[in-house]
Every structure is written in C-alpha cells, then in structure tokens.
Amino acid sequence: MNRRDLLKAGVAGVAAVAVAKGAALAGAGPEGAPAGRLAKKDRLAAPPCGLFCEACSEWTKGKCHGCGCDCGKCIGGGHARQCVINTCAKRKGVESCTRCKEFACTTLIMHAHDAIWRTHAACLDNLRRRKAVGTKAWVAEQRTYWADKNNLHKQQFLEGECKAKVQELKKQGKYKRLW
C-alpha cells in the first residue's frame, strides 16, 4: 500500500492491511505455513522438488507415504535419502526449493527435464504455483486435480514407462541411482 492509498484508507484500512499481513505471517499467504504447521500427510505429499507424491503409484498402492516418511514401513525414507533434490533441501534447511536463494538452480532444472523421468516435467511450474499460493493451498489444488482418475491414470502410465526405462538401463549397467 502506497502513501496515497494509506491516507485514503484511513485507520480502518490500515487495520485491515495489518490483519492481512498478520494472516500471511501466520501461514495464510504465499508460501503457506512453515513446514511445522502443515499436517504431516500434507508435508509428505509436498516434497521440496515440486512433485506431488500422492499422484505416484507407490503412494496409491500404499507402498509409500511420501518423500521423507520415517515410518520404517514404506519406501519414502529411501526415496528421500537417494534424491539429490531432497538431500540438498535438507542440507540447506528449506521446506521446498522455492525457499532456496538459488531457486531454480541447475540441479533442479535438470531434475525437471530428466530424459527418463518425464514425470518430473511439472516440477518447476508446480514450485512456482506453490510459491504463489502457499503449500497448503497448493496441496489442496493438487488433490483436486489428481482426484480425476483420468489424470491419475495417465500420470501413472507415464511413471510405469519411466520405471521400465530405468530397469533396462540398470540391466546394461548404465544407471546407478534411483532419482
């Protein structure tokens, strides 16, 4: 709000701006609440890279609870330890790559444009959207989008193709890590 708008708004307008800013600081504005304020399921579904874990076939089959899950019963912890993006975010202490001062770094860009993992293509756009609306709102939007089984089945079909390519490269000794 500029000075002219402030004078026009008067005391009530200034109070409204203060309330809005307070709400943003409390987690209602862009970039959402800090990771600690999100429900655990939301945190696990929204990894640092911009993917939405609930769209993955491992999640829908109950084999994974999301990137970084430490339950010991699923593969989420293993994914997190092997993922270059996740380990970088953890090392830098950021909830998502959007909070990193180097966003979007070469590693993230190459992750999003991986020749095999084409399912990563939406990462950068997802992160930009997440930054604009906040993590909590972004998770809600993602759940709405992936609730359409047609969208989910197309994504999981593509994921299957990616996994098959990885397996072929592993057989040839040309693929060393999962992500």
Image: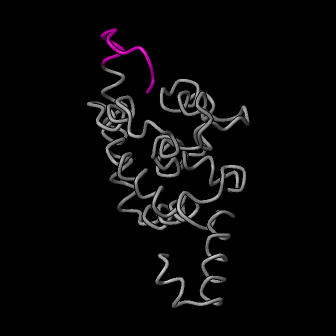
Q: Main SS type for the magenta part?
A: loop
Colour convention of the picture = one colour
Of residue 42 and residue 15, the one placed in the foreground of this image is 15
Where residue 164 sits: x, y (%)? 33, 29
Q: Nearer the viewer, residue 11 or 74?
A: 11
Horizontal relation, residue 42 to residue 5: left or right: right
In this view, the residue in front, 150 or 50, is: 50
Say whether residue 157 is left or right of residue 143.
Answer: left
Report which quarter residue 145 is drawn in.
bottom left
Q: Residue at x 36, y 50 (%)?
A: 155
Where's residue 79, x and y in %? 55, 30
Residue located at (45% from left, 24% from top):
178
77 magenta-colored: no
Count of labels in the image: 0
- Is 93 left, or right, of 70 in this rendering? left
Magenta part of the protein: which range?
Answer: 169-179
- In the picture, the quarter occupied by the C terminus is top left
Q: Quadrant of residue 176?
A: top left
Percent position of residue 16, x then y:
63, 83
| Residue located 62% across and 44% down the image | 65
| As drawn, 25 above or below 10 | above
Tell me residue 83's x, y (percent).
50, 28
* Residue 130 higher or lower than 167, as above or below: below
Residue 177 inside the magenta-drawn segment: yes
Q: Farthest top residue?
A: 173
Identify the residue shown where x is 53% and y is 28%.
Answer: 88
